[in-house]
Structures are given as C-alpha cells and as structure tokens.
Image (spheres, rainbow, N blue to C red):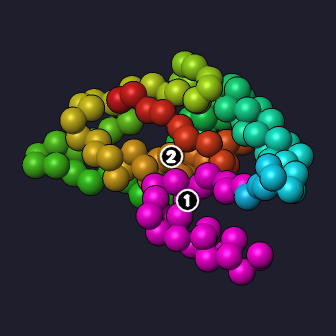
Amino acid sequence: MIFFQKKYNKYIYQCLPGLSFAPISFISAKNNERVVPMIHLALDLYKQANIRVSTSDLNKALEEALTLHRPTRKKSKSPKIYYTTQVSVSPPTFILFVNDPKLFDSDYERYLANQLRNKLPFPEIPLKFHF
C-alpha cells in the first residue's frame, strides 16, 4: 500500500507542480482507514488559512525574499516593492504596494509565495497577492 501512495504522490506532484506545497492525504472510507488523521490535517489547514501576520513580520519576510532574488528588470523600468500588508484570511491575501504592477509576472509571484510559505506560518496553503 505504501508503495502505491508514494507512486501516486509522485504522479500528482508531476501533474500539478504548482501545488507542491499542498499535502496529500490517502483515506479509505470503506475500511475507515486514516480518516481521523485526514480530519486533523484539514483542521490544521483551516488554522493556517486563518492566521493573520503582522505587517512588520510580513515586510521582514518580504525583505529577506527580495534580498535573495530581486524581480527582473523590464525595459527601462526597475520593479520595486515598497511594502505589503495582509488584508484578508482564508486564503491569506496580501496587497503589495509597488511602483508598477505590470512589472511583476506570475513567476515572481510564485517565488514570493514560496518564500513567504517558508518564513511565515502558512507552509501548506495557497497565498493570494494583489500588486
């Protein structure tokens, strides 16, 4: 059984690489197996989705992400992020105050989401951004 779970995990993550942060839970309703751990996982995800982070902690994590990798310059404009704030939970939603939203592509948004997931208490849920 474990072999098939590992194989199926690998298949899912290959088909959906943008969801590599999301946990996968295998259950059997017929045999009533691993149902309780799945419910605990769902509750944990719910708690993560409803966390509100302070603006200072968020901007500190953002600054660390910017230090590691700056957004790519487009034409003669250099993309700048001034600061960010969390405006909603479930899913955690952030507004990033920038010089020009068109300068930030989906690749950089994905990079920021992964960095914030690593530094803040949302390791397994999607994050939403508005530039």
Kindly report the secondary structure that dominates the magenta region of the rendered protein.
helix
The N terminus lies in which quarter of the figure? bottom right
Q: Residue at x 72, y 55 (%)?
A: 25
> Looking at the image, which residue sits at the far bottom?
3
Residue denoted by label 1: 20
Query: For the residue marked with disc 2, what is the amino acid?
Result: Ala
Q: Secondary structure at mark 1?
A: loop
Q: Residue at x 52, y 65 (%)?
A: 13
The C terminus lies in which quarter of the figure? top left
Of label 1 and label 2, which has the lower sequence position?
Answer: 1
Identify which residue, 33 or 109, lies in the foreground.
Answer: 33
Residue denoted by label 2: 113
Instruction: Reply above or below: 117 against 57.
Output: below
Query: For the residue marked with disc 1, what is the amino acid?
Result: Ser
Question: x, y percentage for residue 73?
Answer: 22, 51
Instruction: Reply above or below: 76 against 82.
Output: below
Q: Kindly report which numbered mark, 1 or 2, lies closer to the viewer in this rendering.
A: 1
Q: Residue at x 42, y 58 (%)?
A: 69
The part of the chain drawn in magenta is: 1-25
Left or right: residue 107 versus residue 50 is left
Left or right: residue 107 versus residue 84 is left
> Looking at the image, which residue sits at the far top?
87
As for residue 103 lying within the magenta part, the answer is no
